[in-house]
Amino acid sequence: MSKLTAHPSTPHEVQLQKLTRLRTVSDLWDRAFGIPGTQWRVGLESLLGLLPVGGDVVGLGISIYILWQVVQFNLPKTILLRMVFNIGIDALVGAVPILGDLFDITWKANTKNVNLLESYLREPIKSRGADRRFLWLLFGGMLTAFVLLLIFAITVLALIVQALPN
């Protein structure tokens, strides 16, 4: 057993070990199995996502675990917000029957988040003006998505009420 896996002695080795563990979890969850005859890869999330509600709850739990581990790397808030955004999109769209299962095959929020962590560790950046603009765009996008979802929900509810017998 190597020194790195047995007893990490430097902060860098600890980070590397944690990063390796997070990459393993994200790969298992997002890309563990190839779809025969295609270049597509799916993970346990795509398989468990076929279970109503339960699969999505487990998927969200895995994503939150990865995010919790990533927080310990002291990344800038903008990168953490991008990760939260990735998880939010995955959770919202992933909860839609059938469409969400197809979406899970391509979105891979956990892989995106571990990639963001790796990019930051390769080239650490400090928060800049561009980060603040990103935050405003993110807030505007989330507000727009919320309004659109609200309109969609009200429309569906109205159609259901109209379809009910008098």
Image (cartoon, rainbow, N blue to C red):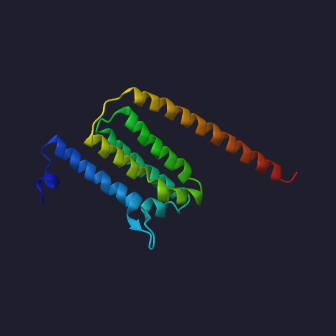
Q: Is residue 88 left or right of residue 78?
A: right
Q: Quadrant of the image for the N terminus?
A: bottom left
Residue 42 in percent (x, y) is at 43, 63
Q: How many marks?
A: 0
Residue 82 in percent (x, y) is at 43, 40
Q: Is residue 40 left or right of residue 123?
A: right
Residue 97 vertical placement versus 74 (above, below)? below
> At x 13% / y 50%, what residue is drawn?
7
Residue 83 vertical placement versus 54 (above, below)? above
> At x 31% / y 51%, what residue is drawn?
22
Which residue is most to the bottom? 37
Q: Is residue 55 left or right of residue 23?
A: right
Considering depth in this image, is 136 or 43 the residue closer to the camera? 136
Considering depth in this image, is 21 or 83 the residue closer to the camera? 83
> At x 40% / y 67%, what residue is drawn?
33
> At x 45% / y 32%, what residue is drawn?
134
Residue 78 in percent (x, y) is at 40, 34
Residue 46 in percent (x, y) is at 47, 61
Residue 165 vertical placement versus 136 (above, below)? below
